[in-house]
Image: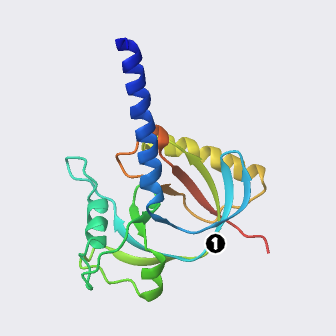
Amino acid sequence: MNSSLFVSLLLVGVCVLALVGCKTSRSGYESAPYSVVKSEGGFEIRDYPELTVVEAPMTERETGENVGFRKLFGYITGKNEAKKKIAMTTPVLISGVMSTMSFVMPSDISSKGVPMPLDTTLSIKKIPAGRFAVVRFSGGRSDAMESEKLALLKSWIVSKGLVVEGEPVCGYFDPPWTLPLLRRNEVMLRVETKR
């Protein structure tokens, strides 16, 4: 076998393994439930039930490390009053202009009672049930990409005659080791439900 064929086969093998690994890793987590009301291209209208989240203010140290994520991860790995380990879920939610990060609580924890955080900067919140317009995209997290997708989503919302009822929320579904091209990210806006 010549070396260029070997290198090509090796690259194909690595890509296949990366794709399988990324798909498997996302599918291993419970995801916030929703029902799709309308789907058009990369846009969807979804109905979500009430969600319980644990929320952290987003701050960064000089190293660029996200302290909010670290605190939330500590909470689900046992730094809570019950010393209970809680399964990671998707998506990780970022609300406002990078002001808060939230982990959605798994359905079994939400129904039995969410343990209080030991860290007083964390809070337990309820996101009321509602309808959301959503646009999906891939790639790494960036302010520029979020702004671009938010502008597209707002334009689509206007074209559908919908009315926005809140601030944007970004959802990130994949672990950091997922290749950017394979990541599932979303920008969401709550919209008025016609009565």
Asked whether, in this view, residue 158 is left or right of residue 147, the answer is right
Furthest-bottom residue in this view: 112
The one of 2 and 4 positioned closer to us in this rendering = 2
Q: In the displayed structure, would residue 152 be above or below residue 128?
A: above
State the residue at coordinates (20%, 48%): 62
Q: Residues within 10 Å of mark 1 (few under 14, many from 20)?
A: some
Residue 41, image quadrant? top right
Considering the image in quadrants, where does the C terminus appear?
bottom right
Asked whether, in this view, residue 88 is left or right of residue 49, the answer is left
Furthest-left residue in this view: 62
Q: In the displayed structure, would residue 138 be above or below residue 66?
A: above
Furthest-front residue in this view: 1
Secondary structure under the numbered disc 1 in the rendered image: strand
Q: In the displayed structure, would residue 61 be above or below residue 148?
A: below
Asked whether, in this view, residue 66 is left or right of residue 54, the answer is left
Chosen colour scheme:
rainbow
The answer to whether residue 95 is visible is: no
State the residue at coordinates (31%, 60%): 69
- From the image, tell me which residue sits under label 1: 130
Considering the image in quadrants, where does the N terminus appear?
top left
The kind of residue tagged 1 is Gly
The one of 133 and 49 positioned closer to us in this rendering = 49
